[in-house]
Amino acid sequence: MSKKEFVEIVSMLRGAYSRTELLRSVAEADVWYECLRDLEFEWMKKAVIQWIQENKFPPTIAEIRELAKKVEQQAYEKGEVKRWQ
């Protein structure tokens, strides 16, 4: 995932959870990007959308990674993509 794509993810999370301090500092955003940049943007975006639709509270990095893996696994099972390592 590129930094530009990550900015889109951050915007989605900030928009959905505007009453929290989630990803408000550059240092926090840098940590999130470092921990999530190996994910494909498509999986990440689907995971974030699903999280927002189903949860009242913002996610952690680990929760987004777990959900992105599930999104990718579903795509793999449908034969849409190669499996993520």
Image: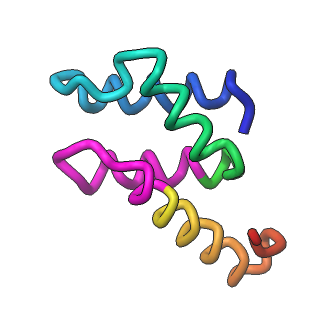
Please give left or right for residue 78 compared with residue 52 in the image: right
Residue pictured at 24% horizontal, 23% vertical: 21
Residue pictured at 58% horizontal, 49% vertical: 44
The image quadrant of residue 16 is top left
Q: Position of residue 11 (x, y in %)?
A: 45, 23
The image quadrant of residue 12 is top left
| Image quadrant containing the C terminus | bottom right
Q: Position of residue 51 (x, y in %)?
A: 35, 52
Q: Is residue 1 above or below residue 28?
A: below
Q: Position of residue 52 (x, y in %)?
A: 32, 46
Magenta residues, start to end = 44-64
Q: Is residue 15 above or below residue 48?
A: above
Please give left or right for residue 59 compared with residue 78 in the image: left
Q: How many marks can you see?
A: 0
| Image quadrant containing the N terminus | top right
**In the image shown, does 23 or 72 lie closer to the viewer?**
23
Residue pictured at 66% horizontal, 29% vertical: 5
Q: Is residue 52 magenta?
A: yes
